[in-house]
């Protein structure tokens, strides 16, 4: 089992910044990659970005490239999401998730076995 706990959400004005954290605990040695997803009201959960735990290889959704940056600190078992130049359309509940299978589709929520409880990000215009 892997437990994930997000923190860092909140209310910010458009153009502002936030940093989300996701701390992993439990059997983290089996984690291949971790990702961030988000779900806005009335919309499906969508892939935001991911990072492989060993090599640090990152992938981003086109909608966030250049504004959001994912990183991880293996020593702290923590993943981060630095969010800059925030827009109102970034408003959503953000979830971190852990993927165990290196051959699964990194953008698919079904590929991630463990999930955090989510943290709300609200961007006011």
Image (cartoon, rainbow, N blue to C red):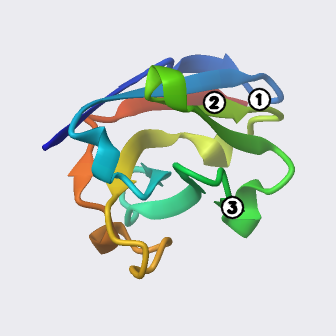
Left/right of residue 30 with respect to residue 32 in the rendered view: left
Q: Nearer the viewer, mark 3 or mark 1?
A: 3
Residue on which disc 1 sits: 14
Q: Residue at x 73, y 54 (%)?
A: 64
- Answer few, some or many: residues within 10 Å of disc 2's Cα (few below 14, many 20 plus, some between 14 and 19): many
Left/right of residue 82 with respect to residue 108 in the rendered view: right
Q: CA distance from mark 3 to mark 1?
A: 21 Å
The N terminus is located in which quarter? top left
Q: Residue 27, labelled with which disc?
A: none
Q: Earlier in the sequence, mark 3 or mark 2?
A: 3
Residues at circles 3 and 1 in contact by the CB criterion of under 8 Å: no
Q: CA distance from mark 3 to mark 2?
A: 20 Å
- Answer few, some or many: residues within 10 Å of disc 1's Cα (few below 14, many 20 plus, some between 14 and 19): some
Left/right of residue 82 with respect to residue 26 in the rendered view: right
Q: Residue at x 75, y 23 (%)?
A: 17
The total of numbered circles placed on residues is: 3
Left/right of residue 100 with respect to residue 78 in the rendered view: left
Quadrant of res 73: top right
- Answer few, some or many: residues within 10 Å of disc 3's Cα (few below 14, many 20 plus, some between 14 and 19): some
In percent of width and height, residue 4 lies at 29, 33
Residue 123 higher or lower than 46, as above or below: above
Q: Residue at x 39, y 61 (%)?
A: 45
**SS assignment at label 2:** strand
Q: In this view of the protein, which residue sits in the foreground, 99 or 61? A: 99
Quadrant of res 25: top left
The C terminus is located in which quarter? top right
Residue on which disc 2 sits: 123
Q: Earlier in the sequence, mark 3 or mark 1?
A: 1
Residue on which disc 3 sits: 60
Residue 77 higher or lower than 98, as above or below: above
Residues at circles 3 and 2 in contact by the CB criterion of under 8 Å: no
Q: Residue at x 52, y 49 (%)?
A: 53
């Amino acid at each position: 089992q892997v437990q994930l706990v997000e923190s860092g959400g909140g209310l910010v004005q458009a153009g502002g910044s936030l940093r989300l954290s996701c701390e992993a605990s439990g059997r983290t040695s089996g984690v291949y990659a971790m990702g961030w997803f988000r779900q806005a009201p009335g919309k499906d959960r969508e892939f935001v970005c991911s990072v492989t735990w060993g090599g640090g290889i990152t992938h981003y959704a086109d909608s966030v490239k250049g504004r959001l940056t994912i990183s991880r600190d293996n020593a702290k078992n923590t993943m981060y999401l630095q969010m800059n130049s925030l827009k109102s359309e970034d408003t959503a509940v953000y979830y971190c998730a852990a993927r165990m299978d290196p051959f699964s589709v990194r953008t698919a929520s079904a590929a991630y076995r463990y999930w955090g409880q989510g943290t709300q990000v609200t961007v006011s215009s």
